[in-house]
Image (tube, coloured by chain):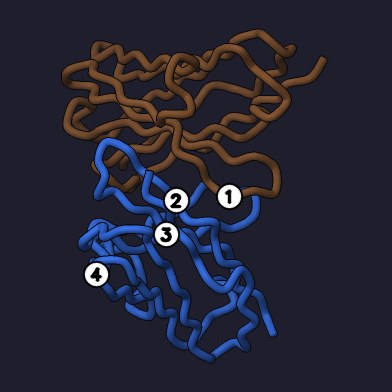
Amino acid sequence: EIVMTQSPATLSVSPGETATLSCRASQSVRSNLAWYQQKPGQAPRLLIYGASTRPAIIPARFSGSGSGTDFTLTISSLQSEDFAVYYCQQYNSWPSLTFGGGTKVEIK
Amino acid sequence: QVQLVQSGAEVKKPGASVKISCKASGYTFTSYYIHWVRQAPGQGLEWLGMINPSSGSPSSAQRFQGRVTMTGDTSASTVDMELSGLESGDTATYYCATGYGYAEYWGQGTLVTVSS
Protein backbone atom coordinates (compact mmCIF):
# COMPACT_ATOMS: atom_id res chain seq x y z
CA GLU A 1 0.00 0.00 0.00
CA ILE A 2 1.25 3.46 -0.87
CA VAL A 3 1.57 5.61 2.25
CA MET A 4 0.87 9.33 1.95
CA THR A 5 2.51 11.63 4.50
CA GLN A 6 1.41 15.23 4.89
CA SER A 7 3.32 18.00 6.63
CA PRO A 8 3.01 19.95 8.74
CA ALA A 9 0.11 18.59 10.76
CA THR A 10 -0.93 22.15 11.61
CA LEU A 11 -0.04 25.35 9.81
CA SER A 12 -0.71 28.75 11.39
CA VAL A 13 -1.09 31.49 8.80
CA SER A 14 -2.37 35.06 8.86
CA PRO A 15 -5.14 36.10 6.44
CA GLY A 16 -3.67 37.45 3.22
CA GLU A 17 -0.52 35.37 3.51
CA THR A 18 0.46 32.28 1.52
CA ALA A 19 0.17 28.75 2.85
CA THR A 20 2.35 25.94 1.53
CA LEU A 21 1.30 22.38 2.30
CA SER A 22 3.35 19.28 1.54
CA CYS A 23 2.43 15.70 0.66
CA ARG A 24 4.92 12.89 0.16
CA ALA A 25 4.24 9.43 -1.27
CA SER A 26 6.12 6.32 -0.17
CA GLN A 27 6.64 5.47 -3.85
CA SER A 28 6.03 7.26 -7.11
CA VAL A 29 2.41 8.09 -7.91
CA ARG A 30 3.37 10.01 -11.06
CA SER A 31 0.82 12.87 -11.30
CA ASN A 32 -2.09 10.83 -9.96
CA LEU A 33 -2.66 12.99 -6.92
CA ALA A 34 -5.66 14.96 -5.68
CA TRP A 35 -6.14 17.56 -2.95
CA TYR A 36 -9.31 18.11 -0.93
CA GLN A 37 -10.50 20.75 1.49
CA GLN A 38 -12.74 19.86 4.42
CA LYS A 39 -14.48 22.22 6.81
CA PRO A 40 -16.04 21.13 10.10
CA GLY A 41 -19.29 19.25 9.62
CA GLN A 42 -18.96 19.20 5.84
CA ALA A 43 -17.99 16.65 3.23
CA PRO A 44 -14.60 17.09 1.58
CA ARG A 45 -14.38 19.23 -1.55
CA LEU A 46 -12.11 18.45 -4.49
CA LEU A 47 -9.56 21.22 -5.07
CA ILE A 48 -6.96 19.73 -7.38
CA TYR A 49 -6.58 16.56 -9.46
CA GLY A 50 -3.81 15.37 -11.70
CA ALA A 51 -1.46 17.10 -9.21
CA SER A 52 -2.08 20.54 -10.70
CA THR A 53 -5.49 20.77 -12.42
CA ARG A 54 -8.21 22.82 -10.78
CA PRO A 55 -11.91 22.12 -11.39
CA ALA A 56 -13.55 25.20 -12.91
CA ILE A 57 -15.33 26.14 -9.70
CA ILE A 58 -12.14 26.30 -7.60
CA PRO A 59 -10.56 29.76 -7.16
CA ALA A 60 -7.20 30.39 -8.82
CA ARG A 61 -5.52 31.10 -5.47
CA PHE A 62 -5.37 27.32 -5.02
CA SER A 63 -2.54 25.72 -6.98
CA GLY A 64 -0.91 22.32 -6.96
CA SER A 65 2.50 21.18 -8.11
CA GLY A 66 4.81 18.19 -8.04
CA SER A 67 5.07 14.71 -9.47
CA GLY A 68 6.52 11.39 -8.46
CA THR A 69 6.72 11.41 -4.67
CA ASP A 70 6.67 15.09 -3.64
CA PHE A 71 3.71 17.40 -4.00
CA THR A 72 2.73 20.87 -2.85
CA LEU A 73 -0.56 22.67 -2.42
CA THR A 74 -0.18 26.44 -2.35
CA ILE A 75 -2.94 28.74 -1.16
CA SER A 76 -2.18 32.34 -2.04
CA SER A 77 -3.64 35.32 -0.22
CA LEU A 78 -5.53 33.23 2.33
CA GLN A 79 -9.17 34.15 2.81
CA SER A 80 -11.17 33.51 5.96
CA GLU A 81 -13.04 30.68 4.23
CA ASP A 82 -9.76 28.86 3.49
CA PHE A 83 -9.09 27.92 7.09
CA ALA A 84 -9.84 24.21 7.03
CA VAL A 85 -8.22 20.77 6.87
CA TYR A 86 -6.56 19.70 3.62
CA TYR A 87 -5.99 16.13 2.47
CA CYS A 88 -3.97 14.68 -0.36
CA GLN A 89 -4.95 11.39 -2.01
CA GLN A 90 -3.13 9.20 -4.50
CA TYR A 91 -4.92 7.21 -7.17
CA ASN A 92 -1.92 5.80 -9.01
CA SER A 93 -2.30 2.37 -7.41
CA TRP A 94 -5.79 2.06 -8.88
CA PRO A 95 -8.03 0.52 -7.66
CA SER A 96 -6.39 0.96 -4.27
CA LEU A 97 -6.54 4.56 -3.12
CA THR A 98 -4.96 6.18 -0.06
CA PHE A 99 -5.28 9.50 1.72
CA GLY A 100 -2.74 11.48 3.67
CA GLY A 101 -3.33 12.28 7.31
CA GLY A 102 -4.29 15.89 6.65
CA THR A 103 -2.96 19.38 7.37
CA LYS A 104 -5.02 21.82 9.40
CA VAL A 105 -4.63 25.42 8.30
CA GLU A 106 -5.51 27.68 11.21
CA ILE A 107 -5.60 31.41 11.77
CA LYS A 108 -2.41 32.82 13.23
CA GLN B 1 -26.48 19.47 -10.88
CA VAL B 2 -24.73 16.37 -9.58
CA GLN B 3 -26.15 15.15 -6.28
CA LEU B 4 -25.43 12.18 -4.08
CA VAL B 5 -27.99 11.63 -1.34
CA GLN B 6 -27.23 9.12 1.37
CA SER B 7 -29.48 7.28 3.78
CA GLY B 8 -29.83 8.40 7.37
CA ALA B 9 -27.86 7.84 10.54
CA GLU B 10 -27.64 4.37 12.04
CA VAL B 11 -26.95 2.97 15.51
CA LYS B 12 -25.76 -0.63 15.59
CA LYS B 13 -24.55 -3.11 18.17
CA PRO B 14 -21.14 -4.76 17.93
CA GLY B 15 -21.16 -7.70 15.57
CA ALA B 16 -24.07 -6.37 13.53
CA SER B 17 -24.03 -5.16 9.92
CA VAL B 18 -25.00 -1.81 8.48
CA LYS B 19 -26.17 -0.99 4.97
CA ILE B 20 -25.93 2.56 3.64
CA SER B 21 -27.46 3.68 0.36
CA CYS B 22 -26.29 6.40 -1.98
CA LYS B 23 -28.62 7.75 -4.66
CA ALA B 24 -27.08 9.63 -7.55
CA SER B 25 -28.68 12.22 -9.82
CA GLY B 26 -27.66 14.91 -12.28
CA TYR B 27 -25.30 12.81 -14.38
CA THR B 28 -25.12 9.50 -16.23
CA PHE B 29 -24.93 7.03 -13.35
CA THR B 30 -22.87 4.45 -15.24
CA SER B 31 -20.19 6.94 -16.35
CA TYR B 32 -18.32 7.29 -13.05
CA TYR B 33 -17.22 5.09 -10.20
CA ILE B 34 -18.78 5.38 -6.74
CA HIS B 35 -16.27 5.46 -3.89
CA TRP B 36 -16.89 4.90 -0.19
CA VAL B 37 -14.80 6.86 2.30
CA ARG B 38 -15.17 7.03 6.06
CA GLN B 39 -14.04 9.42 8.77
CA ALA B 40 -13.90 8.49 12.43
CA PRO B 41 -14.63 11.33 14.88
CA GLY B 42 -11.76 13.81 14.83
CA GLN B 43 -9.75 11.66 12.43
CA GLY B 44 -8.74 11.69 8.78
CA LEU B 45 -10.25 10.15 5.67
CA GLU B 46 -10.08 6.43 4.96
CA TRP B 47 -10.97 4.81 1.62
CA LEU B 48 -13.07 1.64 1.93
CA GLY B 49 -13.62 0.74 -1.69
CA MET B 50 -15.41 1.54 -4.91
CA ILE B 51 -17.79 0.07 -7.44
CA ASN B 52 -18.09 0.48 -11.18
CA PRO B 53 -21.84 1.04 -11.64
CA SER B 54 -21.61 0.04 -15.28
CA SER B 55 -20.21 -3.44 -14.69
CA GLY B 56 -21.17 -3.85 -11.04
CA SER B 57 -17.55 -4.76 -10.32
CA PRO B 58 -16.39 -3.75 -6.82
CA SER B 59 -12.93 -3.27 -5.38
CA SER B 60 -12.19 -2.77 -1.70
CA ALA B 61 -9.24 -1.79 0.43
CA GLN B 62 -7.35 -4.83 1.65
CA ARG B 63 -8.19 -4.22 5.31
CA PHE B 64 -11.92 -4.29 4.54
CA GLN B 65 -11.94 -7.28 2.22
CA GLY B 66 -14.42 -9.84 3.44
CA ARG B 67 -16.28 -7.24 5.50
CA VAL B 68 -17.51 -4.76 2.90
CA THR B 69 -20.02 -5.46 0.15
CA MET B 70 -20.97 -2.95 -2.50
CA THR B 71 -23.83 -3.37 -4.94
CA GLY B 72 -25.34 -1.10 -7.59
CA ASP B 73 -28.80 -0.72 -9.07
CA THR B 74 -28.60 1.08 -12.39
CA SER B 75 -32.39 1.34 -12.67
CA ALA B 76 -32.50 3.35 -9.46
CA SER B 77 -29.09 5.05 -9.82
CA THR B 78 -28.28 3.78 -6.35
CA VAL B 79 -25.29 2.09 -4.75
CA ASP B 80 -25.46 0.28 -1.41
CA MET B 81 -22.52 -0.38 0.88
CA GLU B 82 -22.80 -2.98 3.61
CA LEU B 83 -20.20 -3.33 6.35
CA SER B 84 -20.38 -6.42 8.53
CA GLY B 85 -18.82 -7.47 11.82
CA LEU B 86 -19.10 -3.98 13.26
CA GLU B 87 -16.81 -2.94 16.11
CA SER B 88 -16.61 0.29 18.08
CA GLY B 89 -13.77 1.37 15.81
CA ASP B 90 -16.21 1.43 12.89
CA THR B 91 -18.02 4.39 14.42
CA ALA B 92 -17.60 7.04 11.75
CA THR B 93 -19.25 9.18 9.14
CA TYR B 94 -19.41 7.27 5.88
CA TYR B 95 -19.38 9.15 2.58
CA CYS B 96 -20.11 8.06 -0.95
CA ALA B 97 -18.43 10.05 -3.70
CA THR B 98 -18.31 9.88 -7.46
CA GLY B 99 -15.43 10.24 -9.86
CA TYR B 100 -12.64 8.19 -11.33
CA GLY B 101 -9.52 7.86 -9.19
CA TYR B 102 -10.37 11.09 -7.41
CA ALA B 103 -13.74 11.96 -5.89
CA GLU B 104 -15.30 14.98 -7.55
CA TYR B 105 -18.73 14.99 -5.90
CA TRP B 106 -19.60 13.83 -2.40
CA GLY B 107 -22.70 12.77 -0.52
CA GLN B 108 -23.67 14.46 2.71
CA GLY B 109 -22.36 11.63 4.87
CA THR B 110 -24.04 9.02 7.06
CA LEU B 111 -23.12 8.72 10.73
CA VAL B 112 -22.82 5.14 11.91
CA THR B 113 -22.51 4.64 15.65
CA VAL B 114 -21.51 1.24 17.00
CA SER B 115 -22.37 0.86 20.65
CA SER B 116 -23.55 -1.85 22.97
Residue A23 shown left or right of residue A64 in the figure: right
Label 2 close to label 1 by CB (< 8 Å):
yes
Q: Are marks 2 and 3 in contact (CB under 8 Å)?
A: yes
Whether discs 2 and 3 lie on one chain: the answer is yes
| Disc nearest the viewer among 1 and 4 | 4
Nearer-N-terminus badge (4/3): 4
Q: From what the image shows, is residue A24 above or below residue B44? A: below
In the rendered view, tell whether residue B82 sits above or below residue A55: above
Where's the C terminus of chain B, which quadrant?
top right
| Neighbours of disc 1 within 10 Å: few (<14), some (14-19), many (20+) | some
- The secondary structure type at the circle numbered 4 is strand
Kindly report the distance in space between the C-alpha atoms of the residues bearing marks 2 and 4: 16 Å
Give the number of the disc on residue A99. 2
Supply the letter of whichever chain is brown.
B
Write down the residue under mark 1. B44
Residue highlighted by disc 3: A88
- The residue at the far bottom in this view is A17
Dot 2: element: strand
Locate the N terminus of chain B by quadrant.
top left
Disc 4 chain ID? A
Where residue B47 appears, as percent x and y from the top left, is 44, 38
Which of the 4 quarters of the picture holds residue A70?
A: bottom left
Give the SS element for disc 3.
strand
Residue at 31% across / 15% down in the picture?
B72
Q: Earlier in the sequence, mark 2 or mark 3?
A: 3
Q: Nearer the viewer, mark 4 or mark 3?
A: 4
